[in-house]
Amino acid sequence: MKIDEIKTKDLQVKKFIEEKIREISSVVGDGIAINALSGGVDSSAVTMLAHKALGDRLKTYFIENGLMRQDEPQRIVSLFKNMGVPVEIIDAREQFFNALKGVTDPEEKREAITQAFYKDVFGKLVKESGAKYLLQGTNYTDVEETLAGVKRQHNILEQLGIDTQEMFGYKVIEPVIQLRKTGVRKLAEALGLPKEIYDRPPFPGPALSARVIREVTPERVETVRKATKIVEEELCKTGAFQYMAILHNDKVTGVRGGKRDFGLQIEVRCWESKDALVGSPTRLSYEILDRLAERITQEVPGVVSVTYNITKKPPSTIEAV
Ligand code: XMP
């Protein structure tokens, strides 16, 4: 499938909004569409666009998959509620953790999440709601990286030749597929979303499961969730492109209270990048690094080691999984 990129500098945002609203209305007709809001800039922009196009014929769900950052579901749902967009939280933690049980390979993790999301959770919601369409925030870089074989983004289906109608029983509409992240941010701002949304650092669709090396269990996600909160608190003022905590699989020897403590390792990454295609580590001050190490080992149970990644992309990728 050929997709024509709209470069951010060429994006006429008002015209784009009008066109997409028309397109969504005409495709969905008088039917119902559903979409999943994750709170990221892509799905937030799509939610706003589709809300403007369909009003209460859009059913927006926040899928609580157990892999989100702390307090994220409630925060995002109340933010959208204040803008007049109703969002329902679906508790799907069990389905996702079951799907991830015993899965260690990064691509298999993405596949497990894809299946849990599109088939188990969404398949059921679509049936219950009578919707024939799913709107989602796939962007141009997602498609490009997947087709280039760099990394299978979890939300790429039709570009890989997957017939969603046949496989899951609904069609997918992707209104921002021609835009890169900077274009989506411009769109989100023009749609009236607050700065905390349109300026948000990117966060992967597979959420914290992309930050756990090897098996993803509720306990391991809880560890990385606590570390993520600290990393975000400490690094949000750096203006960096993206920053994260990663839980390693191997344990290392440490010492606590004069005793050997065989414990967990957290890796911190902080990136300078424009489009996530290439990147380099932020030159954080030693003072910041010191505070990160101090807080993570004090506040996250079981962690005895904190490292900072100093590799560029390529050959590294932004996420470790
Ligand atoms: P990588 O790790 O490939 O990441 O250098 C590039 C950008 O994409 C985000 N990312 C994902 N986003 N689904 C997503 O929606 C995914 O499976 C996924 N993997 C990586 C990553 O956070 C970075 O901004």
Image: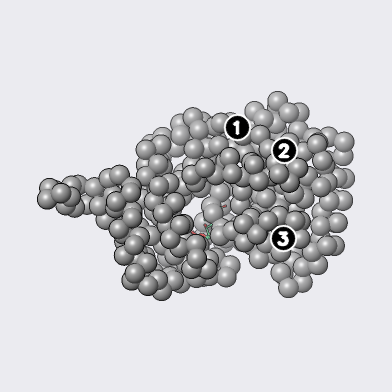
Colouring chosen for the image of the structure: one colour
Give the residue type at disc 1.
Answer: Ile
User: Which of 116/203 is in front?
Assistant: 203
Q: Which x, y percent locates residue 157?
A: 64, 47
> Between tags 2 and 1, which lies in front?
2
Q: Secondary structure at mark 3?
A: helix
- Horizontal side of 61 relative to 298 (left or right) equals right
Q: Is residue 102 visible?
A: yes
Instruction: Tell me the crowding category of disc 1: few under 14, some 14 to 19, or many 20 or more residues within 10 angstroms, Cα based.
Output: some
Q: Which x, y percent locates residue 301?
A: 30, 44
User: Which of 58/279 is in front?
Assistant: 58
Residue, disc 2: 86
Q: Is residue 317 visible?
A: no
Residue, disc 3: 189
Instruction: Tell me the crowding category of disc 2: few under 14, some 14 to 19, or many 20 or more residues within 10 angstroms, Cα based.
Output: some
Give the residue type at disc 3.
Answer: Glu
Give the image quarter of residue 142.
bottom right
Q: Compare marks 3 and 1 and give the one earlier in the sequence.
A: 1
Q: Compare marks 2 and 3 and give the one earlier in the sequence.
A: 2
Q: Secondary structure at mark 1?
A: strand
Marks 2 & 3, CB-CB < 8 Å contact: no
Give the residue type at disc 2.
Answer: Pro
- Horizontal side of 1 relative to 224 (left or right) equals right
Q: Which x, y percent locates residue 77?
A: 64, 41
Q: Secondary structure at mark 2?
A: loop
Residue, disc 1: 90
User: Which of 27/150 is in front?
Assistant: 27
Residue ID at (76%, 42%): 84
